[in-house]
Image: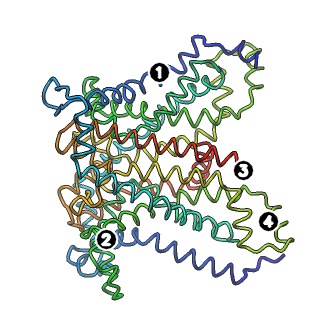
Amino acid sequence: MKNKMGISQIALLVLLTLLAFVFLLPFYFITINSVKTFSEIMKSPAALPSSLQLKNYEIAIRQVSFFRMLFNSLVITIGSVGGMVLLGSPAAWKLVRVPSKISAVFFTIYVAAMVIPFQSVMVPLVKVASEGNLLDNRLGLILIYWGFGQPFTVFLYHGFIKGVPYELEESARLDGCNDFTMFHAIVFPLLKTITVTVIILQTLWVWNDFLLPSLILYAKDLQTIPLSINRFFGQYKNQWDKALPILVLGILPIVLFFLSLQRFMIKGIAEGAVKG
Amino acid sequence: MKQQNRINRMNGSYWVATLPGFLVFLCVVLIPFFIGFGYSFTAWNGIGKHAAFIGLENYKDVLTDDPKAIASIFFTARFTISVVIISNLLGFFLALGITALKRGQGPLRVVFFLPNVIGGLILGFIWRFLLINGLPAVGEFLHIELISSPWLGDASTAFWGTVIVYVWKTAGYLMVIYIAALLSIDQNLFDAAHIDGARALSILFRIKIPLIMPAITVCLFLMLSWAFKLFDVIFSLTGGGPFGATESFALNIYNEAFLYNNYGYASAKAVVFTLLVALLTLLQVKATKSREVQA
C-alpha cells in the first residue's frame, strides 16, 4: 500500500493541529508580552511586540535571584527523589519477597496513607518539623519529602516487582549471594522501567510543589521556583511587565526537561497508570 | 513458594530494607496525622501552650455554623464533577484522534501533554494574565462579548475559568493513558471487524470502549482525587474569589489554619475532608471491582 493520505486523514490532522495551537496559546501570550512595556501590554496584548524590552528579563532575573531559586529547586528535587528511590525500592522488594503478616501490614498502611490529603497533616507537621529542627532548612524539607513520597514509591515498585520472576534471585541465593549484593547487583537493574516512572512522577510533584515548601522554608535565599514566584506576585500584583518574564523563566527549566526527555516521560506516565 | 519462604525470612536485612523509609514516613505523615486528629477536639489557636478540649464542638460548627465551609464543599463537588467529565472526554477524544493519525502523532502528543508538566501555582498566574488581559483583548478585537468580559470578576465565569484552566492542565495526562490503552488493543480485532463490515462508530462502542474500560476507571479515579484536592491553581488564579465563589475545600482549610490561625477548628475540617476523600475512594474501589467481574 502506498502511504497516501486520505481526505479524512488530512481533516483530522488539521483539526488536531488547530487544537494544538489553542493549547499553546497561553505560552504564546506570556512569551510575547514578556518583552513589551507595561503600556503596550495593556493596549495590545495580542499583538507582536513593537520593540524587544529584554531589559524586563534583566530586571526579573535580578529581582527574584533566578539562579539562586533554580539551584534550590534542583537540590531539593534531586535530594528528595533520589532518597525516595533509595528508601522505597528495597522496602518494596522485601515486602513482595517476604510474604508475612508484617509485610501485609506495612503495605496496607502505605495504601491507606495515599488517601490522606495534605491538609489534614499540615498543621501538626509544622510543629513536628520545628521540634525536629527541620524548619527553614533544605535538608529538613528533603527528609519530609522522603516520608511523603514513601507510600506511592513503595506502591509503584510493589506492583512491578510482583511481575518480576523469582528464579534469578533463587539461583543467586543458592550461589551464596547476600541480600545487599543481591539487591544492588541483580534486582535493582531489573527495576529500571519502574524506576524511570518513579523518578518522573515524583520529580514533577516535588519540582512543582508549593504548599509543603511554603510551610517549611521562609528564608529568602532558600526559596524554590514556585515559592519565589508566589512571593514576587505578592509584591507586584498585576504589574505584568515585571511578572511575565518571571513566569516565562519559571516554566523554562521544567519545559526543557520535558522536551528533552518527552519519550521517556510519556512512556513512564502510561506505565505508572497501568500499575496505579 | 515454600522454598521462597525458607530463604526469604524476616531476618536483619528485612528490617534494614523496610524500616528506614517507614520511620521517616511515620514521623512526618502518620504521627502528624494523629496529632491533627487530636487537635480537632480542641480550640487551639497556635499561640497558647495548652489547647482547651472542647469535644465535638468543632465538628458541630463545621456542619451547622459555617456557611463558607459548606459553600466551599459544594464548589469542590461542582468543580470535581465538571472537570472529571470534561477532561476525560477531551483526553479520550484526543487519544482517539491521535491514534487514528498516520503521521504527526509524536509532536501533537507532546503539545497536548505540555501544560501538565507545569506546576499548578504557576499555571494559575499564567491564566490570571490571560483571563484578565489576554482574552478580553482578543474578544474585543473579534467582537465576541463572551470572551471580552472580565472572567475572574464574576462568580459564574470565574467558576468556568477555573474549570478551563484545570482541563487544560489535565486532559493531556489522561490522553497519554488512553493512547497507551488504545494501542494495546489487538489489531486483528479491527481487521476482523472491518471484514465483517463494521462501521467506525460500532467499532468505537463495541470494541474500543469495552476493551479500555480499565483505563477509563484509572482516569476517572485520577481526576476525581486530583480535582477534589484542588489547591494551588485556585490559590494563584482567583485566591478563592470573587467573594469566596471559587474557594475549594482545601483552600478553605488552609485559610482557616494559616490566615485565621484557628488550628483546632481547621483540624476538624481536615478530618471531615479526609473522611470525604476516603469515602470517594471506597466507592471508586467498589465500582471498579464490580465492573471487573462483569468484564
Q: Secondary structure at mark 3?
A: loop
Whether discs 4 and 2 lie on one chain: the answer is yes
Q: A64 or B143, which is in the foreground?
A: B143
Q: What residue sits right under mark 2 in the picture?
A: B131
In the rendered image of this protein, does residue A240 appear above or below residue A162?
A: below
Residue at x-position 32% and y-position 34%: A138
Q: CA distance from mark 2 to mark 3?
A: 45 Å
Whether discs 4 and 1 lie on one chain: the answer is yes
Q: Three-letter amino acid code at disc 3?
A: Ala
Q: Three-letter amino acid code at disc 4?
A: Phe
**Which one is earlier in the sequence, the residue at label 4 or at label 1?**
1
Q: What residue sits right under mark 3 in the picture?
A: B295
In the rendered image of this protein, does residue A35 appear above or below residue A74?
A: below
How far across and how far down the image is residue A176, in percent? Answer: 73, 12
Image marks 4 and 1: residues in contact by CB distance under 8 Å: no
Residue at x-position 46% and y-position 42%: B279
**Which one is earlier in the sequence, the residue at label 2 or at label 3?**
2
Q: What residue sits right under mark 1 in the picture?
A: B20
Q: CA distance from mark 1 to mark 3?
A: 41 Å
- Left or right, B131 with reference to B13: left
Q: CA distance from mark 2 to mark 1?
A: 47 Å
- Left or right, B250 with reference to B50: right
Whether discs 1 and 3 lie on one chain: the answer is yes
Q: In the rendered view, how is the structure colored?
A: rainbow
Q: Secondary structure at mark 2?
A: helix
Q: Nearer the viewer, mark 4 or mark 3?
A: 3
How far across and how far down the image is residue B130, in percent? Answer: 33, 70
Whether discs 2 and 3 lie on one chain: the answer is yes
Q: Nearer the viewer, mark 1 or mark 3?
A: 3
**Which one is earlier in the sequence, the residue at label 4 or at label 2?**
2
